[in-house]
Image: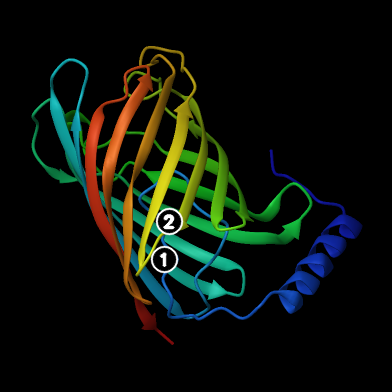
Amino acid sequence: MPIRLCPLAATVALLAGAVAAAQEPPRDPHAVQPERPTVATHAYTVAPGWVEIEAGIEFDRYPDGTRGSAAPVVVKLGLAPRLQLDLDGAVVHPPQGGTTGIGDLAVGLKWRVLDGAPLLGDFSVLPSLKVPSAPAASGLGTGTTDVGLLLISSHQLGPVSLDVNVGYTRRDGPGTRAPRSASLWTASFGGSLVAGFGWTAEVYGYPGTSGPAGDAPIVAFLGGPTLLVRAWLAVDAGVIVPISGPQPRALYAGGVVNLGRAW
């Protein structure tokens, strides 16, 4: 069922966004805004007409001893002030030892709704759509069409940034390869140290799911160093450690580059 806003509420929301946009300080459009390596994303958007690419690799070791890996890539394109298009894909090596290939593709639209709001801080919504572009039998995809919604709240607590996300995904299909519904929560922290070096730490969780492909709830910790090489280039590395549930142990590394203005 479509969500409808009454005209008055929509008008108030647009006016509030316009006032906040007029008050916010100017940002360097060529400065990177890394969303990786954390599961969480921040509320901020790439400047209109600018392109930013995030890429990395993760090596997983599952509780049963099997191994897998993935090399995710996200292309972020600023469409308008407060509006960003995300194009997501990954090269996947399934833990079952199947053929390495390109996984399912997804598209998202991040809309920064509020800045400096009480409790919510800088707040964005990110609806997304994943299509079954990869063969499910090979383990590269789920064979489902996924519709997701992520709520993003970002805060600056002195020298420390905080990003809190809550998300929900609904899938079609019988639920034999992936649960028909899933959710997540994250709390991610980060800060600067010296000479471009920084740190990031995150606790995240995937509540338990039901159905033939259901799984136990997961809680895990992610953390590691970051390095701002140039204003337009940042790199990262670190570890993922399970706290509870079937989360694999993992090592990751990657980077973010702002390619500049596309138009």
Q: CA distance from mark 2 to mark 1?
A: 10 Å
Q: Secondary structure at mark 2?
A: loop
Instruction: Please tell me how many numbered marks the rendered image carries.
Output: 2
User: Along the horizontal axis of the image, is 98 left or right of 56?
Assistant: left
Residue 211 in the image, given as x and y percentages of width and height:
43, 13
- Read off the residue under disc 1: 76
In percent of width and height, residue 41 lies at: 48, 51
Residue visible at 63% across and 61% down?
112
For residue 157, above or below residue 112:
above
- For the residues labelled 2 and 1, say whether their Cβ atoms are less than 8 Å apart: yes
Question: Quarter of the image holding residue 121?
Answer: bottom right
- Nearest-to-viewer mark from 2 and 1: 2
- Rate crowding at label 2 as few (under 14), some (14 to 19) or many (20 or more) other CA atoms within 10 Å: some
- The numbered disc on residue 35 is 2
Residue 167 at x, y percent in the picture = 55, 37
Q: Is residue 2 above or below residue 255?
A: above
> On the rendered structure, is 205 left or right of 1?
left
Q: Quadrant of the C terminus?
A: bottom left
- Regarding mark 1 in the picture, which secondary structure is present there? strand
- Whether residue 142 is visible, yes or no, is no
Instruction: Say which quarter of the image contains residue 192.
Output: bottom left
Where is residue 210? Give x, y as percent: 46, 13
Amino acid at pointer 2: Glu
Disc 1 marks a residue whose amino acid type is Lys
Residue 193: mark: none
206 horizontally vs 159: left or right: left
Mark 2 and mark 1 lie on one chain; the one further toward the N terminus is: 2
- Between 208 and 192, the one lying in front of the other is 192
- 191 or 85, nearer to the observer: 191
Q: Residues within 10 Å of mark 1 (few under 14, many from 20)?
A: many
